[in-house]
Amino acid sequence: MVGLAELDPPYLLPSHSRGRLCYTLLPERDIKNITLTPLAPMEAELIAQLRRRIPAHPLLRLGPGDDAAVLRMADVDECVVTVDLLTDGVDFRLSDVDPRRVGHKSLAVNLSDLAAMAARPLAGVVALALPRRDGLRLALELYEGLLPLAERFSLAVAGGDTNSWDGPLVVSITLLGAVTERGPLRRGGARPGDHLLVTGSLGGSILGHHFDFMPRVDEALVLADRYELHAGIDISDGLSIDLAHLVEESGCGAVLDLDAVPVAEAARRLAEQQDDGRTALDHALSDGEDFELLLAAPPDVAERIIAEQPLEVPISHIGHFTAEPGLWQTDKAAGRRELVPRGWQHEFD
Ligand SMILES: [Mg+2]
């Protein structure tokens, strides 16, 4: 990874072409002979630096710098498209966090949506609305967090758009993904009798996981390749709310077995730290931003998955789907009762 200190200042030669202001990036050997404008408009400078930083990719016929990117997609039959919008003050606080972690999170939440569809990442575009002050430095730091994750999942960074304004930082990333031979994994396919499965452990993401998580792309592809799955979603709003999304789309109900919910260590720490009466299990049910996979599978398939444990992270059986619409929770101590979904929801004034 190239550190920021190693990025040279760009040398750009301004010129006019058909009424438009253009900038040409000069090779270093030409610099001595020409009067230069070392400071260019931010976007041109950003593009020049990104062109040097973003690696070549087999999908990218034409990358950042032109009016649009060109992708080679010959072997892609169906394409999944997803977009996310993250705003300073809502999804993160720039005053409290390194911009590189914001860059990582901005891409990771999108990759998590591709994982939820059991889609392989192909390419993405990045749109930034930057605060005017220090915008270029901020943009480069965001990319420093984002690019290693793109490389980790062989994602082509095809381009984007950048503006500066008097508002807070806004990051919007759009991704394309390819579905596997089994087709996209959807929210609406759960059937009565299916088992409810979840990867990893849940709750307490506010202690750091919501910035640093690794999206479950590889896990989703392994599961979708080897097993018949009926439905899936990634847990962004919280287990109980995202389970409600699954049953609504599937036209059925579900019973959640509280004794089986895998509670994260961070959820236990958070419950100890905060004096608000919420237990570690409460955090696991409703904190959100776990970015684990919540899946519906036929009982025999689910039993095989649980027995074989094909992932590097544990996968747990935490309930089942019912013909009767609704959500219930059950445990040995109190038996079955209604489950009211709670979690993160964006609010509008
Ligand atoms: Mg999602």
Image (cartoon, rainbow, N blue to C red):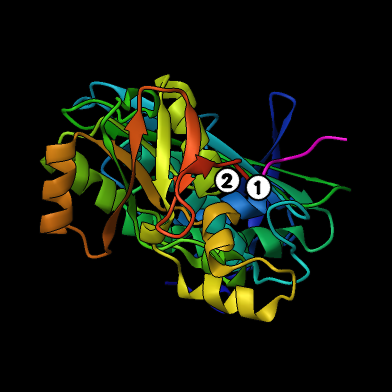
Is 186 situated left or right of 94 in this image?
A: left
**Residue 34: percent from left, percent from top:** 66, 60
Crowd rating for badge 1 (residues with CA inside 10 Å; few <14, some 14–19, many 20+): few
Compared with residue 232, is residue 259 higher up or lower down, i.e. above or below?
below
Circle 2: element type: loop
Q: Which residue is mark 2?
A: 237
Amino acid under disc 1: Trp
Magenta highlight on residue 7: no
Earlier sequence position, callout 2 versus callout 1? 2
Badge number at residue 215: none
Circle 1: element type: loop
Q: Which residue is mark 1?
A: 344
The magenta segment is 344-349
Q: Main secondary structure of the magenta part?
A: loop
Q: Disc 2, disc 1: CB below 8 Å?
A: yes
Label 1 C-beta lies within 8 Å of the nearest ligand 1 atom: no
Q: Residue at x 60, y 57 (%)?
A: 287
User: Looking at the rendering, in which quadrant would you find the C terminus?
Assistant: top right
Is 143 situated left or right of 149 in this image?
A: right
User: Looking at the rendering, in which quadrant would you find the N terminus?
Assistant: bottom left
Compared with residue 331, is residue 228 higher up or lower down, i.e. above or below?
above
Residues 187 and 78: in front is 187
